[in-house]
Image (cartoon, grey):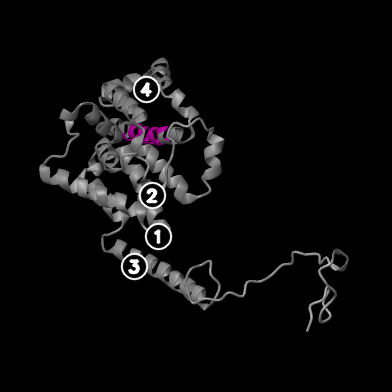
Amino acid sequence: MGRGNGPTMGLPGTSASAMVTIPLHRTASISTISTNATADNLPGPGRNVGLLFGWIGGHLEVRLGRVMSHRGYGPDAVANTLARVRRHHVGLLADFYSSAAEPSKGFEPRSKAERRKVQRLCKTLLKYTTSHVESTQIAACNRITDLAIYDPYIRLLLCNFLSSNKADLAGLSLDLMSNRSPEGYLQDDYDPLLSSSRTALISVTETRVHELWAERSAEWLYSVTSFHALKSSQEEYERAFKSFEHFLDHGMVSLLQSRCVVHLYATVVTRTEEDNAS
């Protein structure tokens, strides 16, 4: 059989005049790949089984967390134990900050055993921020915020126990003194975990607000006489709070400042009631 230049077996030849142009069109298609792997992004029965196991595991962890909390475990139980060991039920915020400014007034733990116990509880509370249950993480961050604002000694311990970049709380990082406006922070506060972890991180690592409160508390909140002088003098009141104004321009730092003001108000109310009773 000879080889010719024309068409063979009904197919077009190789000449330019016989070339046929076929247009290409992009059409939607559905992947038919099926696998038994349990990864979420792979279709097939394996993915469904993986999602089912993940859902069951999440609910089981939440239920076990509630049971352990009733038995004295969990962030709330640890924080309550810390408050009891540090005797928060018998002290006011002004007393703790004044003790921070004057350590001889009882800022440090009373014994080495108490110091070791407080350190162990602080480490445990920080570990709860890395839990796989979001509600546990949020509870741990909220309790860290409360303890860091109320007790300067616990705040220092928590700050020392954080990672070297001081931004590893609940796996989130934050530029503490960014120039973002308060509105910028409010946009992120729709995420409860992000909001609570940022607040806890600010409460632990922002030293300037705490130092300022320690200074003012030692100056005019520790003694009843100076407290009455502050209350009776509007000019002195405005002068004392003048130093706090520049902190209110920073969204998250202003939140810390407002929490301190709330504690101050509780101190004022408590001491007023004590004066009236006497």
Q: Earlier in the sequence, mark 4 or mark 2?
A: 2
Mark 3 and mark 2 residues within 8 Å of each other at the beta carbon: no
Q: Which mark is residue 184?
A: none
Q: Quadrant of the N terminus?
A: bottom right
The kind of residue tagged 1 is Val
Towards the viewer: 180 or 94: 180
Q: Split into 4 quadrants, where in the image is the C terminus? A: top left
Give me the disc on residue 170.
Answer: 2
User: Which percent across, then down, holds residue 21?
Assistant: 83, 65
What is the distance, in whole Å, between disc 1 and disc 4 at their CAs?
46 Å
Residue under numbered circle 4: 231
Q: Identify which amino acid the numbered label 4 is placed on.
A: Lys
Element on which disc 1 rests: loop
Q: Is residue 259 magenta?
A: yes
Give whichever of discs 4 and 3 has the lower sequence position. 3
Which residue is identified by label 1? 133
- Give the spatial CA distance, label 1 vs label 3: 11 Å
